[in-house]
Amino acid sequence: MTQNEKDSVKKKIEEEILLTQEQISALKEKVKPIAPDCSLGRLTRLEAMGEQHMNNKILEESKIKLTRLKNALLRVDKPIFGICIECEEEIGFGRMSIRPESVRCVECASKM
């Protein structure tokens, strides 16, 4: 991967970190407990609880993604960045520009 490509990926990582942090902040508001005295009907309460459960899952996944992005930002200037941890071949720039936190090439990722 050339230095220009690494710089482009680094910028993408920084942008995604900001977006993910904003998403996490918004989700933290949505997963707050629903007060039992809140005047919702039975079905509406069940829907709200289902939505809250989905938002909790998304929040967990967003936190994991944020950790991976921060790790990628630490690795971006090192020689191991963009190298697959399985086959040790270079991960394509296309994949790195879409999923900059990737540590496996498409072929190795599809085997998992």
Image (spheres, grey):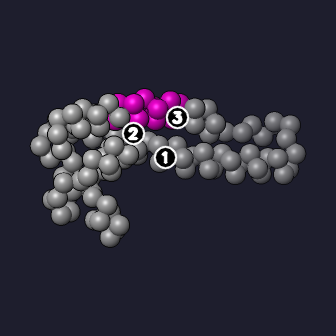
Q: As rendered, which of 94 and 57 lies closer to the eye? A: 94
Q: Which residue is mark 2?
A: 66
Q: Which mark is residue 96?
A: none
Whether residue 89 is visible to the viewer of this picture, yes or no, is yes
**SS assignment at label 2:** helix
Q: Nearer the viewer, mark 1 or mark 3?
A: 3
Q: Which mark is residue 60?
A: 1
Question: Would you say 105 lies left or right of 66 here?
Answer: left
Task: Please state the horizontal and vertical placement of residue 51, each as a whole percent of the image.
Answer: 68, 47
Q: Residue at x 55, y 50 (%)?
A: 57
Crowding at dot 1, Cα within 10 Å, few <14 / some 14-19 / many 20+, comes out as few
Quadrant of the rendered image containing residue 5: top left
Q: Which residues are magenta?
A: 13-25
56, 4: nearer the viewer: 4
Q: Is residue 22 magenta?
A: yes
Label total for image: 3
Pointer 1 or 2: first along the chain: 1
Q: Which residue is mark 3?
A: 23
Q: Quadrant of residue 27?
A: top right
Residue 34, image x, y percentages: 72, 39
User: Quick one: 82 or 49, which is closer to the camera?
Assistant: 82
Left of 41 or right of it: where is 48?
A: left
Q: Amino acid at mark 3?
A: Gln
Main SS, magenta region, reads: helix
Q: Mark 1 and mark 2: span between their CA atoms?
A: 10 Å
